[in-house]
Image (spheres, rainbow, N blue to C red):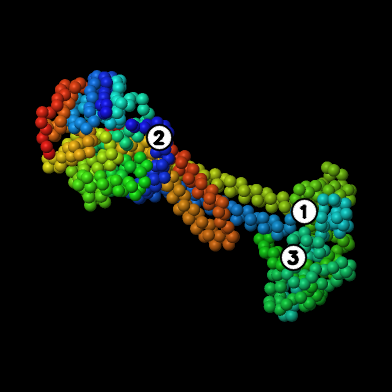
Amino acid sequence: MADLIETRNLVKVYNSGDVKVVALDEISLTIDAGGLVAVMGPSGSGKSTFMNILGCLDKPTTGKYFLEGIDMGNLDRDQLAHIRNRKIGFVFQTFNLLARTSALENVELPLIYSGVPAGKRREMAMDALHSVGLSGREDHYPNQLSGGEQQRVAIARALVNSSAIILADEPTGNLDSKSSHEIISIFQRLNIEKGITVIIVTHEPDVAAFTRRNIIFRDGKVAEDKIAQKNTSA
Amino acid sequence: MLDVSARALWRIGCSSFNMFFLSSLKIAFRAIRVHRMRSALTMLGIIIGVGTVIIIINAGSGAKSQIAKQIAGIGSNLLMVFPGSTSSGGVRMGAGTKPTLTISDAEAMKEACPSVKFVAPTWGGNAHLVFGNENWSTVVTGTIPDMFQIRNWPLAFGSLFNQRDINTAAKVCILGQTVVENLFGDIDPIGQVIRINKIPFTIIGVLDKKGSSPRGRDQDDRIYVPFSTAQKRLFSTHIPGLVRTIMVQAKSLELMFEAEKEINALLMQRHHIQSGQEKDFTVRNLTEIMNIAQKTANIMSVLLLTIAMISLVVGGIGIMNIMLVSVTERTREIGIRMAVGGRSKDILMQFLIEAIILSLFGGLLGMVLGITACKVIAAVIKWPIPISWEALLLAFVFTGAIGVFFGFYPANKASKLNPIDALRYE
C-alpha cells in the first residue's frame, strides 16, 4: 500500500487584518499506514493547523494533500464530510462531546451520518465503548463522567466507524497524569492491535515518548523529524 | 479504495435519510424540551395566529350560514313593491303612506312581467283577538296563498285558504306559532273559532315556526286571512282593492333585476308616470339587501383573516429569531457534527425539522385554542359554529409552510458554517 498520508508543499496563510500570518510553510511529508506519530512544537508553530488540514476540517492555501492517494483538494464539502465520517476519527483537547446526550448516543453520532440502522448502530457503539473500558457507562451524560472517561468516550466515537486514522489534538491537555496515561495506552493499543494510524499533537515529552515518530514544528516548518530509537510501552 | 463518487454518496444519503429523520426529530424535541420557556414563548405567536385564523374562518362561515338562513327565511328572490309617499305642504311622509297600489296592479304584474313567478298583495292592520278567556293583539294580514310560496313558509298543520275562500271573503284564518302559544296553549287550534275584532273566524291552519326577522321582529306573531276578507270585513278601504304591499318572487336570482325593471315599467305605464317624474311606488330588492349584508360579512372576514395572517407571519419571524439564536448557541455542536461526518444537508435538515416542529406544535396548540374559542363563542351568542376540517387542515399546512419558510434561513446559515470555525467557536 502507498503512503497513507502525503503532503506536498502545504502552505496555510491567515489574513488577520493587514497582517499575513504564515501558519504552514511548504510542508512536505509522508506518514505510513499504521504509524504512531507525535506532532510537537511550541504554540503557534503550525501543528494544529497541520492537523486540521490532515483532518479535512480546513483547506490549505496552496499545496496538495493526498489521503490514500486521493487529492483532497479536488473534493467538495460533502465528499470531505464523507472522508471525515469513514476515514478519520477526531479526539480533541476539550473532548467535544454533545452535552445532554448520553455516552452511547455520542458514540453513535458518526454512524447516524453513515446510515447505519439503529440496532446495528447501538451494537457497534457498545463494542466501541467496551474497547475503551466504558461498558456500563453508556447511559451517562458527559457531565456525569470524569475528564478521562469523557476522553475515552471521544476515542470510542473516533474508532466506532473503523476509521483508518485517529487525529488527536492535545488529547491529554485537560487531564491529570493518571488519566493521561490511560488515554495514551489506549492509543498505543489501538495502534498495535487494530493497526490504526494515530497522530497526536502534544507538547508533553512524556506523551511523545510513547510514539515511534516525532515531528517537531517550528514557525510553520518541520524543524525535526525523528524516528524514536525505542519507545516506552504504556 | 475509498468511493467518493456522487452516486455512492447519494446512496448513503438515501439510506441514511429515514434514520436521520428520526434522530433529527429526537434532537429537535430534546432542544425544545431543554429550552421549554423559550420554545413556549416562540410558539405563542403561532398559537395566537392559528387560533385567530380558526376562529375567524369558522365564526365567519357560521355568520354567513346564519345570514343565508335569514335570506331563505324572508323568501328567495324577493321584491317588495310599496305605494309611494304622500306629501303635505312639501313634507313627504315616507313610503307606503299614499294609497296608490291596488290589487289590479298585482294582477297585471303577474300577467305582464315574464320574469315574475309569484305575486301576492297584502292588506292588513292590527287587531284584537279573543279565544275563550284568553286575548291577544297582533298584526292581521290579508293575502293570497302564493304569499306562503314566496316566503317559503310551509304549514305545520291544517290547510291554506282556497280560491273559494277568497271569492267569498270567508272568515277563515291561519295562525303563526306565537299567536297559537298565546291563545291556545296545549289545545289543538285547528277548527276552533276565534274572534278578530269581535268577528268570529275559523282556524284552518297553523304555520311553521319562522323565528325572528333579520331586524329582530317576531315573524310568528301574525295571523293571515284571505285578502278579500281583510278588505271587506276587517280593515275596510275607501278605495276597493287597495294594497299595502305587493310581494313578488322573481323566477331566479339572475332575473331579479329584470323583474324589477319590468315592474317599474309596468307600474309607470299603469300610473301614467313619465320617465323623470317622481314615482308613486317603490320597488325594493330584499335579496339584494341581504346579499350586501353577506358581502359586508365577507369583507369583515377577509380583513380579520388578513390580521390573523399578519400575526402568523410575526410568529414565523419569532421562530426565525429563536432559531438564529439556537444556531449561534449550538455552533460548537454543529462543528462536532460536521467533524464526525455530518454533511451540509444533514445540518440543514436538523435545524429545519426543529423549526417545523416548533411551528407545527404551535399550530396544533393554536387549533385547540381556536376550536375551544369557537365552542365558547357558539355557546354565548347561540349561533351554531360548525368546525370546518378544511380550515384545520389549511392551518396545519400553513404552519408547516411557515416553519419551512422561516426556518430555512437559520438552518441554511448553520449548514454553511466552516467546520473548523464552528469547532473553535467559544
Disc 2 secondary structure class: helix
Pointer 1 local density, CA inside 10 Å: few below 14, some 14–19, many at least 20: many
Residue at mark 3: B154
Query: Pointers 2 and 3 in contact (CB under 8 A)?
Result: no
- Residue A41: give x, y in percent of width and height: 16, 27
Is residue A5 or residue B149 the one in the foreground? A5
Instruction: Write the residue at 87% across / 57% down.
Output: B107
Task: Out of B338 and B262, give the one closest to the viewer.
Answer: B338
How far apart are the two marked residues, 2 and 3, measured between alpha carbons?
A: 76 Å
Residue A188 % position (x, y): 17, 37
Task: Give the side of residue A150 with respect to residue B320, left or right.
Answer: left
Residue positioned 28% across, 37% down in the render: A163
User: Could you tell me if the residues under marks 1 and 2 are in contact, i.e. CB atoms within 8 Å?
Assistant: no
Give the left or right position of residue A14, taking residue B225 as reference.
left
Q: Amino acid at mark 1?
A: Leu
Residue at far front of view? A1
Q: Residue A136 placed where, x, y %? A: 23, 52
Q: Is residue B136 visible?
A: yes
Instruction: Using the rendered view, name the quadrant where residue B7 is placed.
Output: top left
User: How far, Cα to Cα, is label 1 from label 2?
Assistant: 76 Å
